[in-house]
Image: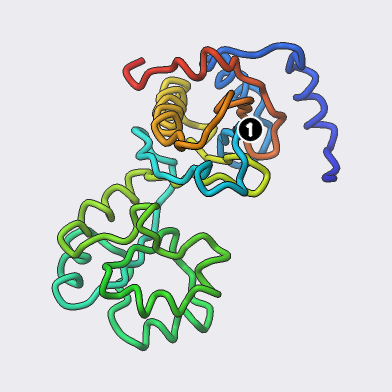
Amino acid sequence: MAKHGKKYWAAREKVDATKYYAPQESIELVKELNYAKFDGTVEVHLKMGLDPRQADQQVRDVVVLPHGLGKTIRVLVFAQGEGVAKAQEGGADYIADTDEWITKIQNGFTDFDVAIATPDMMGKAGRLGRVLGPRGLMPNPKAGTVVSAEDLPRAINEAKAGRVEFRLDKTANLHVPIGKVSFETRKLVENLSALMDAIKKAKPSGAKGSYIRKVTVTSTMGPGIKLDNNMIQNMSVEE
């Protein structure tokens, strides 16, 4: 168990452990209690009423946050032929179109945040599973990162704008960033609303009982703040 310092405990004392906060109130408190000397990330953690061992109870999807994540996203594209021009058009930071690029990545080059591939390049990209897989960088159709050459500009633009993947882990939890502490409260609330809308739409066919059991919001190094489950699930992207 990680040890916390005095600043953490001082911040935690200001959180009512018996209270379930409204979305905006929770975000305001996260910002107020931030004590990190850097611009920390605001994260949402959800305990889901799902069994990760069951194929029909998996949750994996993406959401484009309306206000992004507050950082520069570097995109690498595996493409060839027409896909190279489309990747350039979309503003890709790197285009892996040769065997030399595959070797470079095999040797440890991972200076990018998102990898996108066209279907005809997945054979080569698949060879990089040991490098990309553990880092969550392997292109996958379910994550919207395997697309046709024509769709490359859209996929690249979405990735740079703040597209975030969420995926159920082995402990039936989702962990999703929604922006930076420095964001305006309104922007964080709207990002949170977009995330909740996407999670509700991604509800698997095998879900039984309570789909979302617990929602907590926190910042890097900060204490967790419990959200009111009814209010969080009734949020609207129009709010």
Whether residue 226 can be seen here: yes
x and y percent of residue 46 in the render?
A: 60, 32
Q: Is residue 25 above or below residue 84?
A: above
Q: Is residue 173 left or right of residue 191?
A: right
Q: How is the image coloured?
A: rainbow
> Residue at image x 44%, y 41%?
69
Observer able to see residue 179: no
Residue at the image position 63 percent from the left and 31 percent from the top: 218
Q: Dot 1 lies on which element? A: strand
Q: In the figure, is residue 7 to the left or right of 64?
A: right
Mark 1, other Cα within 10 Å: few <14 / some 14–19 / many ≥20: some
Q: Is residue 201 above or below residue 151?
A: above
Q: Residue 78: x percent and y percent?
A: 31, 72
46 or 107: nearer the viewer: 46
Residue 144 vs 125, above or below: the answer is above
Front residue (pair 204, 11): 204
Residue at image location 26% in from the left, 50% down from the top:
157
Q: How many numbered marks have been drawn onto this rendered protein structure?
A: 1
Position of residue 115 in the picture relative to residue 109 (left or right): left
Residue 145: x and y in percent read 34, 58
Q: Which residue is mark 1?
A: 47
In this rendering, is residue 98 above or below 147?
A: below
- Which of 138 and 222 lies nearest the eye of the viewer? 138
What quarter of the picture does the C terminus occupy? top left
Quarter the N terminus occupies: top right
Q: Residue at x 43, y 41 (%)?
A: 70
44 vs 189, left or right, is: right
Q: Position of residue 103 (x, y in %)?
A: 44, 86
Name the foreground residue: 31 vs 120: 120
Amino acid tagged 1:
Lys
